[in-house]
Amino acid sequence: MADGSAPGIKPISGGVHLGIEHESARKHVTGAATYTDDIPELPGTLHVAVRLSDRAHARILGMDLAKAKQAPGVHAVLTFDDVPGDGDIGPILPGDPVLAPDVVEYAGQAVVAVAAETLSQARAAARMVEVFYEDLPAVLTAQEAMEAESFVSPSLTFQRGDAAQAVASAPRRLSGTLEVGGQDHFYLESHIAYAIPKEDGDLLVHSSTQHPAEVQHAVAKVLGRPMHGIAVECRRMGGGFGGKESQPAQIACIAALLANATRRPVKFRMDRDDDMLMTGKRHDFHVRYDVGFDEDGRIQGMEMDLAGRCGMSLDLSNGVVDRAMFHADNAYYLPAARITGHRCKTHTVSNTAFRGFGGPQGVIAVEEVVDEIARSLGKDPLDVRRANLYGGPGRDVTPYGMPVEEPDILAELLDQIERDSDYRNRRTEIDAFNARNTVLKKGLAVTPVKFGISFTVKHLNQAAALVHVYTDGSVQVNHGGTEMGQGIHTKMAQIAAQEFQIDVDRVKVTASATDKVPNAPPTAASAGTDLNGQAVRLAVRTIKGRLADFLAEHCHTTPDKVEFRDNAVFAGNHAMTFPEVAKLAYLNRVSLSSTGHYATPRIWWDREKCEGRPFFYFSCGVAVTEALIDTLTGEYRFPRADVLHDCSGTINPAIDLGQVEGAFVQGLGWVTCEELWWDGQGRLRTHAPSTYKIPTSRTIPEDFRVTLYTARPNREDTVFRSKAIGEPPLMLGISAWLALKDAVAAVGGHKYPVHLDAPATPERVLLAVEDIKARMAAGG
Amino acid sequence: MTGSVRFVLGGRVVEVRDADPTTTVLQWLRAHGRPGTKEGCAEGDCGACTVVLGDLTPNGKIRYRAVNACILFLPMIDGKLLLTVEDLASEDGELHPVQKAMVVKHGSQCGFCTPGFAMALFALYHNDRNPDDDAIHDALAGNLCRCTGYRPILDAARAMTAEGNEDRFDRAEAGIVALLESVRREGTVSVSGAGKAFYAPRTVDELAKLAAEHSDATLVAGATDVGLWVTKQGRRLPTLIHLAEVAELHRIEESDGQLEIGRLEVGAAVTYTELLPVLQRRIPELAELVSRIGAAQVRNSGTLGGNVANGSPIGDSMPALLALGASLALNHGGTRREVPLDRFYHGYRKSDLKPGELVERVLIPIPKDGQRFATWKVSKRRDQDISAVCAAFLLTLDEGGKVAELRTGYGGVAAIPARAKALEAALVGQPWTAEAVAAAMPVLDQDFQPITDMRASDRYRALVAKNLLMRFYLHTTGAEAPSLEAAHG
């Protein structure tokens, strides 16, 4: 036993609230971080290529597989008919066949899968497959689907008051439409799974997935085997962004089916183009609105239809369109509202989760409404935004009946950013610039965001963890979350270190694995740290409780006198280093391993009645962005952006700053340069970085000032009172689009409405400029 | 033919025999215990596969260049130093300054793009110890990151030289030079494997002879396009002839005075990176455009000659070359001829090149005093994008301020890069005024009927093609800062 001055008793390093480096940072920069494709291949490993449909909607009349089967190196050629179990892997409802059965429903759908000794052999063989189709009529866009009443699921409406009456009786009224484009995730690591046969027909599947349990479930299903024989593991992903929530199941199932058929290890690493053609993206939306307001721009009633293009199946689209509806108020109080979400079925790839999960589409819709209200009144859009903000007597309940319990934070954030960004002076300077220049125009815009935290499907709001203490006092943590770059493993290590009061480098967080933590929900909805952090804390507390009981008895004191501090434990007059305690507890037959399980309290949602408290709390932020456009070409730059996001209680401020910046830029890309373009036959023609343009280093605001707001620890009992951060700041990127709108408006002296669909490519900006010029020429 | 590919990797000479010559450097690395270098796109557009090549300069130093390993054929690195992310830290684990800076600035999140960024930063570190932000963006424009929003990576680039101006590669330079000298070749390298052959001749005569003998061969300089034929289209290229080891083709001749006009003669193996400093001096407007062709990795491999010979309708250099009145020196088995560029293209990817003939040099007249030249590229994204419209203008005014001659070049608006001859004719003799320019703009509809595709609509292309003429007018008069770059550079 050591006394208080013993070596090893020292303040801990790397607890919570510290901006320590990402646990893999050194491995990232040296190339030592192992991704699925970097796992050394077992002898005999086969590689996969798929043959994708080039038709949007067609009956498969037949296939000629003979050439592919006889091609060099080929071991298996699989179609839907070869699936031993259930070939449908829809995550909520059926509709997502692992390979196309008798009908293809989108161009890009996998029809045949080939396993061969080398990747180039597999790809060559896949090209030899001949598929004979009979084309069927195809519905391609959300608008076409609305006209054809083609839906994957019934429409849903939130209704408060008589919105139509409120709109009709308001002093002023505006209506309009907005097209909001989708977005490819463009995780740098394309989809991949590596399936390794084990004894008894079991499989170990390495999958780049945000949801190992779903991969396990789907693989078991297609093989017709119990889940206990399928283990899924993921150390890290090279980016996820929602694209690896439901989508990895298909990739893993194809690998697993081929591994099962050949009894060989099978790796399916998708070519970038195939990945972009075959897997789902952010939903594009067609928005229609009708809004009534007063002379101050204050909304009295709003009717809005949000039509999301879901693609050929439901996938997660109910949740996505619901979340668009949940965010069609954004930061604004709507006294009367009808918000309807339509789930359009089209013959295009089934759209899926993407950071924000429909929220961004709802937010951009209402931001368009507020922006156009301001233009119609000749007011600064910031003033109209302020006039509509939640807050004040009776203005604190959402259209779906959830109280906004902390409405003042929105005004607080706006006040601070208006000051920090020097908004009013810059508005004056920009007006002067625009008066001086005819070719170049500047715009300035503010966007607030209020984003609901929790899965709106209640049962997903749970998490589990498994914590081991070894006899040397080192700690291993496993939890249900997955690491996609967001730093969840770093935060979990910090939480465990803080709770145990040991140095963070004594904690190792290991790969997510279904055989360590089963039945985990996806790492999604910004809730990874909230959920898993609590589970880790509970597991640690269980072990600490056992140690306290044991030490109380051992040191003749009471458990409440046992204190964990400074890499040590103090019990009565005794002080022992943590390793000493671990060893001692082991020798005294105390369990040093525990699970923890957490379920988010307070939340409920009745989807039938459209009421409840779907969110534990809201995460809020604001951004001010300046745009500079060239009215000859529509090209633009963003000279400056100021971002302020509420990260009070942050577990790791450096990581959270990275989340805010990264999300903002991803949102900026969504509404500016990232354009998905389908041809008239429903074929995506932007399926590689040569044609699909995500932001580069020069795309970002030249003067980019991002600040974390830390004045309001979470009023809810979250882990160390922190707030979720993954998705909310993405919506602040919408300010870039609004700034472009403002710059376009400047062409006409801010006298004309601006129609600028998203993404605002240079083309769309130029055509919007031309539209203003035409209105000016027409004298109205 | 039993030659091998030899290069320096991990401090020693590596010799590879019997490899398929169209194996990419990325495929080879990942199959040989170096999985740090990643595949993100296999088309040279994301930079995750960035590695650094080192070669000897005439003064015995090492020149470091970032390249995309995913579209680089293995035999093309014969004789070079190959550095990957695994090579940067020292053997005792001490991080290289660029790695340290990335860690300290929180420059990685998912980490998948990080090896590529580390290598791009390493190349920048060795080419510019005090880079300004423009140089940093130029060095990183070919590397996509989807997580960070770039700010911390830019900060890392700004901080990487904070701890001193020398790294262990500088200190070990003499040893590396010796290794590189040990793998230097004199004659043609020829390797074969998987039924395919690769030749890298050392002289123009050898090159011309090989090309004439193998008229079905694919000529590559940087393989920034041909690489994709293999990785994306699965094409089988039985014979490759590599131009880049022909020293003569790396020469840029500048002639002044003796002719009526000065001109640049650019060898077909001159990379964009090699060309840029000369252009900055002689035709700065063209340098601006060339600095937006691809990104650093592409410009380090790709060549003007390849761009021209490839004949893509969206190649960015041709409009400028057309406007400047460039011509090509062609070589067929030693027989040379010169063809004006505006008579070189016959149709979509069809050119005047005969089987076995090659582009040896690109001959670019330098604008004379009093002539005005400018060229613009318009794309969805400023960097590493393909233009929706590209336009170039060379204007000669007479003494009365009227248009004596206007030569134009347009890309993206027709099946081949072409001059807008109706427009040129319409403006000759007109006063160079905003009104005259505006009146001439509709004439472009006679020259081009652009198409709609994923990059732009027909309407946008037609509009921009016209507006760029107006931009050129504003540029020549200096009436107003006519471009975003100028307004906020």
Image: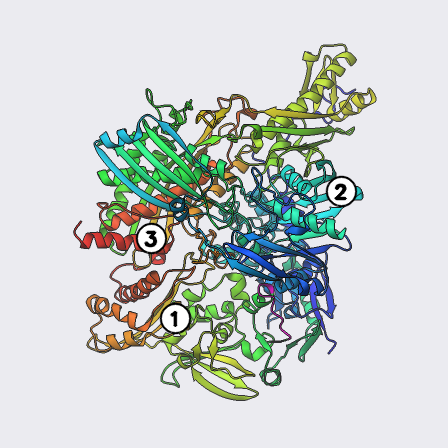
User: Please, which residue is most extreme toward the bottom here?
Assistant: B335
User: Which residue lies under the disc numbered 3?
Assistant: A765
Circle 2 crowding by C-alpha within 10 Å: few under 14, some 14–19, many from 20: some
The answer to which image quadrant residue A166 occupies is: top left
User: Please, which residue is most extreme toward the left here?
Assistant: A779
User: Which residue lies under the disc numbered 1?
Assistant: B414
- Name the one closer to the observer, B468 or B245: B468
Residue type at the position of mark 1: Ala
- CB of mark 1 within 8 Å of CB of mark 3? no
- Foreground mark, 2 or 1, reads 2
- Where is residue B284 shown, x and y percent of the image? 39, 68
Circle 3 crowding by C-alpha within 10 Å: few under 14, some 14–19, many from 20: many
- Where is residue A647 shown, x and y percent of the image? 48, 31
- Name the one closer to the observer, A510 or B312: B312
Q: Which residues are magenta?
A: B231-238
Q: Secondary structure at mark 3?
A: helix
Specify which label sits upstream in the sequence, 2 or 3. 2
User: Which residue lies under the disc numbered 2?
Assistant: A202
Question: What residue is rendered at 46% in x and 64% in y?
Answer: B293
